[in-house]
Amino acid sequence: MYIGSTGVEGLHHLVWEIVDNGIDEALAGHATSVEVTLLEDGGVRVYDDGRGIPTDIHPKTGKSTVETVLTVLHAGGKFDGGGYKVSGGLHGVGVSVVNALSTKLIVRVHRDSKIHEQTYETGVPTGDLKVVGKTDKTGTEIIFYPDASIFETTKLNYQTILDRLRHSAYLTKGIRTSITDEKSGNRCSFYFEGGIKSYVKHLNVGKDVVDEDVFYVDKQVDDTQVEIALQY
């Protein structure tokens, strides 16, 4: 399996794939937040305020780029001519695997002042991408229901996702991540202006440090970005 297992770890990889797509938008300077909601009916909603998946016709498939991304392996990082900067939970195979492993998936794209929506069942579209409303924002919202006939359990762990979102917020300075559990009412949000510099400070709380200042470097050369935070 691309997701590693059909157990709890593989189940959570589905969430990581969608979340990492939003983190990629943030790294590219197009998104400021990624929100995860555990729905009361067992589904998961992930929303990022990035550019939104392109809705035009894909030149290679003849289908909308949204449908191409959701049904073709590795298509997600190619529609804009560049690859993702974050290695997703599914080893880069894309949201199409999340779609295939879900009994139902709904995608809503906020782009060009319109809300585009399409629904899938076990990876197959039930209809074409259509405009369902107007919007003054941009972004991508995906709601999916993991397939109980594939996974040993479809119950996601709030704390596991919370820890991952905290980690992502540390690694991507300036982005806000949040998780909401509709059943329990629990909600948590993370934002770290200093990114990994803040993370190093967090790791060393209560420790005897040599220097109070964290050594920090953030430099990009061509397409490679290097960010280092260090404290003894």
Image (cartoon, grey):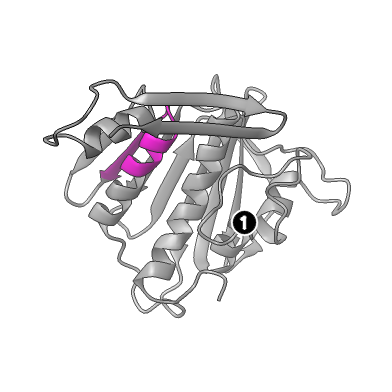
Which quadrant would residue 53 be assigned to in this image? top right
* Viewer-nearest residue: 184 or 168: 168
Tell me the magenta residue range.
166-180
The structure residue drawn at horizontal position 32% and vertical position 58%, both measured from the top left corner, is: 41
Residue occupied by mark 1: 94
Above or below for 202 versus 18 = above
* Quadrant where the image shows the N terminus: bottom right
Under circle 1, the secondary element is loop
From the viewer's perspective, is 71 left or right of 134? Answer: right
- Residue 174 visible within the image: no
Q: Position of residue 50 (x, y in %)?
A: 56, 30
Which quadrant would residue 61 be assigned to in this image? bottom right
* Quadrant where the image shows the C terminus: top left
Q: Position of residue 141 (x, y in %)?
A: 51, 41
The structure residue drawn at horizontal position 32% and vertical position 25%, both measured from the top left corner, is: 214
The structure residue drawn at horizontal position 23% and vertical position 34%, both measured from the top left corner, is: 202
Q: Could you classify mark 1 by the number of other residues whose Cα lies within 10 Å: few (under 14), some (14-19), or many (20 or more)?
A: many
The structure residue drawn at horizontal position 45% and vertical position 76%, both measured from the top left corner, is: 5
Could you tell me the amino acid type at mark 1?
A: Gly
Which quadrant would residue 112 be assigned to in this image? top right
Does the magenta run of residues contain 58? no
Q: Position of residue 2 (x, y in %)?
A: 57, 71
Does the magenta run of residues contain 179? yes
* Viewer-nearest residue: 53 or 191: 191
